[in-house]
Amino acid sequence: MRMAVTQNPWQGRVDHGEQGDTTRLFRIVKALDPADTAPLDHAPVLLGFRCDAGVLRNQGRPGAAHGPDAIRQALANVPAHGLQALYDAGNVSCDDGDLESAQQALADAVHAVLARGGFPLVLGGGHEVAWGTWQGLRAHLDAQHDDGRVLIVNIDAHFDLRTSRPASSGTPFDQIAHACAERGQPFDYVCLGVSRLANTPALFSRAEALGVCYVEDVDMQERHLASRLAELSAHIDAADHVYLTIDLDALPGAVMPGVSAPAAYGVPLPVVEEVARLVRRSGKLRVADLAEYNPQYDRDHLGARVAARLAWRLLR
């Protein structure tokens, strides 16, 4: 599995003649040389996961493999607002359906960024990205002999706890649960935005058996925000490290049309953004990813802009 180089998406507007700071992200982003080992000093590093093999295995609509570069294109023109450093480590590509090799390649890339002191932000790709992201974080912590508690915060309409194999976009957190059990480590999983109409009773039973803390979408509206943030803060306080994963299909379909399974109800963007802000500012966020953006079903690039907005929140 290779780190694929794609057509340069980092192009944007140059405000000739304007006074003041007009810097946009495409002006500050730099390609990350995988051969370089210099410290990154907590700088954000984008990693693309060009893969929807897991979505296909889960009987979803393909197209998320084109998500990473579409999100980059939307990010390119965003004002930097003081962000001094941003790196792009390219894409891990899954062109042959070999999902497991692609996930391992992603894990290796995440581990490499963490080893240099960077903050990896992975752009999916289907939610099968989560198994690769988590493995990369776990490998880094193992290399540091760090047995601290890892809290997974998933904003998602789906539990993604399917027990069927081969693995797919619907199985990553079940895979993580099994890996934690094999290691004798706790499976600390918070799933926010679960839709009762998108998960079978069997999946709710699986979540309860694993001790998953979940909140349904009907209880993740703006009127609930203060309570949800307080509850999440308590979970973060009890953890040493946090992995945040945002499945964009948690958002209402009117806001995020570009996904395989758009939500009829969903979690409002201001709520998702505040959750992301809380996690980022906790000082415990080690890695994050955005999953399931599918430009094939987007409308006027709206979904790309929403994904870019959330990514920008996580970069700072």
Image: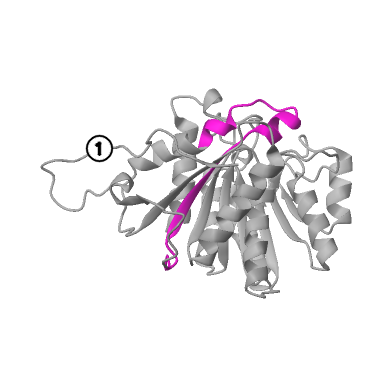
Q: Residue at x 49, y 67 (%)?
A: 117
- Residue 58, quarter of picture: top right
From the viewer's perspective, is residue 273 above or below residue 96?
below
Task: Give the percent coordinates (x, y) of residue 38.
Answer: 41, 66
Q: Residue at x 74, y 38 (%)?
A: 168
Judged left or right of residue 110, residue 161 is right
One can see residue 75 in this view: yes
- Quadrant for the C terminus in the image: bottom left
State the residue in front, 50 or 158.
Answer: 50
Q: Which residues are magenta?
A: 39-67
State the residue in front, 85 or 234.
Answer: 85
**Is 160 one of the magenta-colored residues?**
no
Judged left or right of residue 251, residue 27 is left
Judged left or right of residue 167, residue 140 is left
One can see residue 233 in this view: no
Q: Residue at x 35, y 40 (%)?
A: 10
From the viewer's perspective, is residue 170 above or below residue 223?
above
- Quadrant for the N terminus in the image: top right
Task: Give the percent coordinates (x, y) of residue 49.
Answer: 57, 42
**Is 64 one of the magenta-colored residues?**
yes
From the viewer's perspective, is residue 276 above or below residue 259?
below
State the residue in front, 273 or 301.
Answer: 301
Name of the residue lying farthest toward the front? 35
The residue labelled by disc 1 is 13
Task: Give the percent coordinates (x, y) of residue 273.
Answer: 51, 51
Name of the residue lying farthest toward the left? 17
Q: Secondary structure at mark 1?
A: loop
Mark 1 surroundings: few (<14), some (14-19) or many (≥20) residues within 10 A: some
Judged left or right of residue 214, residue 140 is left
State the residue in front, 178 or 248.
Answer: 178
What colour scheme does the image use? one colour
Amino acid type, callout 1: Arg
